[in-house]
Amino acid sequence: MTEKNVVTAIRDALHDEMAEDDRIVLLGEDVGNRGGVFRVSVGWMEEFGEQRVIDTPLAESGLVGVAIGMAMHGLLPVAEIQFADFIHPAFDQIVSEAARIRYRSNGAFGCPLVIRTPCGGGIHGALYHSQSIEAFYAHVPGLKVVMPSTPADAAGLLRSAIADPDPVLFLEHKKTYRAITGEVPDDRHLVPIGSADIKRQGSDLTCVSYGYSLHTCLDAASRLHDDEGISVEVVDVRSLAPLDTATILDSVRRTSKAMVVYEDNRTYGAGAEIVATIAEEAMFDLDAPIVRIGGPDIPAMPFATPLEHLYMEPEPDQVYQRMLELAHA
Amino acid sequence: MTEKNVVTAIRDALHDEMAEDDRIVLLGEDVGNRGGVFRVSVGWMEEFGEQRVIDTPLAESGLVGVAIGMAMHGLLPVAEIQFADFIHPAFDQIVSEAARIRYRSNGAFGCPLVIRTPCGGGIHGALYHSQSIEAFYAHVPGLKVVMPSTPADAAGLLRSAIADPDPVLFLEHKKTYRAITGEVPDDRHLVPIGSADIKRQGSDLTCVSYGYSLHTCLDAASRLHDDEGISVEVVDVRSLAPLDTATILDSVRRTSKAMVVYEDNRTYGAGAEIVATIAEEAMFDLDAPIVRIGGPDIPAMPFATPLEHLYMEPEPDQVYQRMLELAHA
Amino acid sequence: MSTRVAPTPHGALGLSDDDLRAMYRLVLTARLLDEAALRQNRMGRAAFVVPAEGHEACQVGTGWAMRKGVDIWLPYYRDGALVLAAGMTPYEVFLGIFAKADDPSSGGRQMPSHWGHKKLGIITGSSPIATQVPHAAGIAYAIKYRNEDAVVGCWFGDGATSEGDWHEGLNFAGIHKLPVIFVCENNHYAISVPQSKQMAVEHVADRAAGYGFPGVVVDGNDVLACYEAMKHAHDRARAGEGPTLIECKTYRFLGHTSDDDDKTYRPRDEVELARQHDPVHVLGTYMREHRLIDDGGAEELRASVKGEIEEALAAAWDAPDPDPSSAMRHVFAEPAGGVGQ
Amino acid sequence: MSTRVAPTPHGALGLSDDDLRAMYRLVLTARLLDEAALRQNRMGRAAFVVPAEGHEACQVGTGWAMRKGVDIWLPYYRDGALVLAAGMTPYEVFLGIFAKADDPSSGGRQMPSHWGHKKLGIITGSSPIATQVPHAAGIAYAIKYRNEDAVVGCWFGDGATSEGDWHEGLNFAGIHKLPVIFVCENNHYAISVPQSKQMAVEHVADRAAGYGFPGVVVDGNDVLACYEAMKHAHDRARAGEGPTLIECKTYRFLGHTSDDDDKTYRPRDEVELARQHDPVHVLGTYMREHRLIDDGGAEELRASVKGEIEEALAAAWDAPDPDPSSAMRHVFAEPAGGVGQ
Ligand SMILES: Cc1ncc(C[n+]2csc(CCOP(=O)(O)OP(=O)(O)O)c2C)c(N)n1
Ligand SMILES: Cc1ncc(C[n+]2csc(CCOP(=O)(O)OP(=O)(O)O)c2C)c(N)n1
Ligand SMILES: [Mg+2]
Ligand SMILES: [Mg+2]
């Protein structure tokens, strides 16, 4: 075990995989010369060669499209989109192409592609460097979407994503990059795609979250325990698609109370699916209405500190407060 | 009042608006010379001139981007995307640009743009001429998304969309085009964006739907009434964003039972938001768990008749059956 | 002084008489197959067909320079003649038209003419226009990376050249000097939109200069001209000299698809004029002129091709439909599948 | 024989001495403003700034050919000097840098340098690269449609030319011969990606031929050359002759933004070499050579500009922050707003 932050865990895992398997190529804007905007691949162009660490033109659709071609011809491309906010030009290539190649060819072709991209806010990124994009992609059959929140999960899920025969969107919350550290196994451990994880056990209520919000929830749960002796179970979704409904429902049935917390705009966000699933499958196990906390329905978050705070900062207290209310409901 | 089908209602309303206001221009692939693939604008290039009925190059992102520019400079563009399945290349222009122009300029600029596009399946369109796209867009703050299911709503909502100072995605279910007819007021009536509509009153349960599925639900409700004397209230969402939660919740509270039906892939579909809203706001008013029926989680629907049926056809019976069960629950 | 026989035009290109006979058979097969498929459509037995009529020469000419089983093909929906050149059989084509379980493209999941054939190196395609262009570049990159001796061919219409993906794909291919050939079958319309409303230039090929590789214009009704341009591009690609953009000027004789009525947007005399350069007749005339076929042989050939098509059609019609429950399969790899297959 | 004074180069372009003095003041203001902003960033008072250093001549030169209050501007984030030429004040720029409520671009909602100024005809811009290119074409279409005498200017970097939107926007503008000028500020890098990995051509301008309009290359450090090319394009646009693509060869002296360290990807000697053509010095030298300014005047000007900037900075720093609750506003038009404003 080694203590690392999230971005280091990602870097180390990706580095080790590349060293093991030369079918893996990394492509994206500024991944070569500069080693990536978040410095994940510094020095790799020299280490693995320019053929494997490819600085692409500024063209996300082309970048993903080229990666799809590589994936259909024996390579295992890892495409980096510099910021999740800039993945939108590639929407068609991801949704119409990567996600449908296996289905449309009746299983004859596959597309083992990983798309990594830093997402989420709270880092002064304003409207176009703060977006949450999981809701757009988790809805797409044929695509897997994961979003780790801890260094160990980041490493383990990235390895699983690379080993996966189908396209995986790998979302990295920027605010976890350096802020979140933890123990990471030194071996090549895998975290299976499609499995949620109980990050804190509890009995009074279940809080389901993912991404940076997960840490907000863990923090609130820990304070609630200290302050009020309330025991909150915190479930880390980790894999948005496929969604591990079994783990979520099992926890909710045990605690009889559920809340769902996510950073993305609330309405039609990914949390709606989780709430809906609980409502359909476990409604009569519940002692109180399900609580949903999502971001405000404004385009990502503004730049000015007071405005960004309105989006991100009320959250910790809001989560704490709503947990408290739900526990007493 | 005049009896029309949906596509004729759309054609007439758009025609009248264009005749009234020469700021309105229509642009899209094949809208001019050919009068549109669904023949909405036949003869308009001659009638309104080539400057107002613009055959664009085959480039959806550019098409929407150009329309955004027009909208920011005094015109009222109506952009037609030939099939909803081909809107994906324009995702960035719609989400990053059209939907954010007002917010990002702190209200200084606006983008009065309408994007019309035929969506939905059941017409042998296979994977790329059958898609439902509302879930991708209803989630985007700054964008309005409507989906009429009757000729009168189509005409009234289209007029409201054109009059709206903000971008509106106007979804037209292809299977309603000719299959659904109804009375349309002869005056320039408006249907407000953001209002759901009770299409059938009932007291035993509430069924919330939209698009072609609405008709499946109406049909099942009517058969259930005849067969079993069960009284189903059918709510037509009509406007996915903003969502009229008041009308939906009011109905659910009255009947104490809710089901939500939509054609799109079930998981993370728009119906999840509706179910989640009911669960949060009206859970203790319910006598039975909420029922959700969505399309299978496969990429749109296959071409071969037996496969397409698997997607679309079980639905009528499934809806009927689930209504029956819910009524007796 | 020794007497020397002047070489035939095809001989000068290194094509044997048998090559020409095979090419002619392909061109004719494509045409007769189209006609048969359209009849099936009119009879209500095929919901949707896409005729290639008018495009046969540019497809067979460019396809002939590709090596079956070695090179990689990314056709578009209009490429009914091209996929025959790539090795698909009429039976396989009809399996797609009738949406049968054994359709090699998609098992009846996609509309007909959305080609794919794993064994033949025909990459699965979709409806959205031009998305295959970056794929072609990516495959060519992988070929170069893996030091394979393969060339990628990528076909599309004039309409496709307006898409962002087209620009991005060609640009990437140019930067990395990839072994890929881009073939534009310019029939001057994207459905109803004439070329003048698609671009302000006369030649699509002129855009190649902006990507740092050659663009050539050929008569798309002349199978030999198309072959020659493609062969040259193919040699360039194998020699590591990078991509080529070939623009074949051609014409579509029928509606865009069986759903389209082109009378609303194309003047009849324009269509009639184009038909005077019908590539099937042009090649037929060449065959006779160079004594590669005589009237009897032509009749025989036509009868033989017709027979083949009728047989294929009948067999495909009788083939099993896909099982409804199979619709849920292959969203993701099934347990047996491995990485990168 | 009458004696004739040889016209100055700027005189030959129709520019008065006062024009030149005003242009020089703009160039200098941009430079000193950048320096002041960077200091604020280093002091922790500005989270993020985007220096224009190195691009001043091409921005002021092209901007000078535009008519304030008539023409329409679509700048990109690098265009700190251009927006001054369009009429923004240093105070307004600092309101953006400090994310203040009165920031005309966005009221502090967007990162600094995401320009917008309704009154000045500067169209609101975003971060995603090249999205403004189709907007420029659409605005130009509306101008032509409404028979207005306005021209659209659209600026972007070399990186932007790889995006599909760039291709689609230029293509549309070419087809409709729209009154729009596309200006590429080619500094040979998209962040760290050198031009050779972005395109296989030497000149972006060569791509214009593919869209049916002229492309010209100019020395982006020469304010007069940039003005001349832009003026010519502007005349063409007003005369209904359609778009022009102007490529200004230039260089960025500093990091991509205050978040970037360019030492990891650009050799120092390359940067030093480029600095020898510093557009501020180039223009300063020209001013002296043509006696438009002397040493005293230059000192005075610099002091005056500095004073103006300090004052603007201080006033902007003291301006009110946006109210947190305002973050919920303007997602949609508020009741007072009408259509098409
Ligand atoms: C992205 C996208 N937009 C629109 C369509 C609808 N569409 C299908 S074919 C076509 C025209 C294509 O024209 P061209 O590329 O010239 O090929 P041709 O049919 O003439 O051979 C259009 C607009 C589509 N399939 N994909
Ligand atoms: C669509 C998109 N992809 C990626 C980025 C990240 N990014 C910001 S600026 C930039 C480089 C732009 O280079 P260029 O156009 O040459 O302008 P320059 O900064 O050199 O003036 C990149 C990759 C972005 N803003 N938008
Ligand atoms: Mg065409
Ligand atoms: Mg640059």
Image (tube, coloured by chain):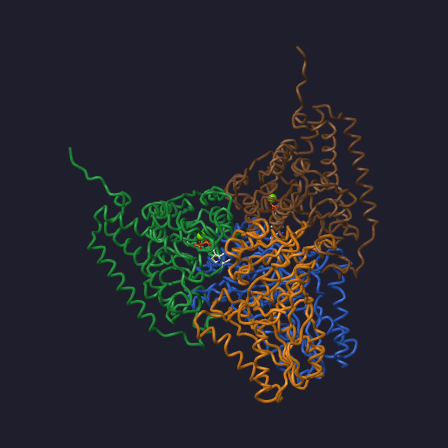
Chain colours: A orange, B blue, C brown, D green
Q: Residue at x 64, y 47 (%)?
A: C142
Q: Can see residue C318? A: yes
Outermost residue on the top side: it is: C1
Query: Is residue A285 placed above or below D142 in the rendered structure?
Result: below
Closer to the camera in the image, D191 or D305: D191
- Which quadrant is home to the N terminus of chain D? top left
Residue located at (83% from left, 46% from top): C315
Q: Is residue D338 left or right of residue C268?
A: left
Question: Where residue A319 sits: x, y (%)?
Answer: 56, 81
From the image, which quarter does the C terminus of chain D lie in?
bottom left
Q: Nearer the viewer, residue D16 or C279?
A: D16
Q: How many marks?
A: 0
Give how far across and how far down residue D107 sits, in percent.
Answer: 40, 69
Identify the image quadrant of residue C73.
top right
Residue B53 visible in image:
no
Q: Does residue B232 appear left or right of residue B168 in this picture? A: right
Say above or below: D321 vs B46: below
Q: Position of residue A133 (x, y in %)?
A: 57, 66
**The quadrant where residue A172 appears:** bottom right
Q: Position of residue A142 (x, y in %)?
A: 68, 61
Seen from the viewer's position, the closer of residues A42 and B253 is A42
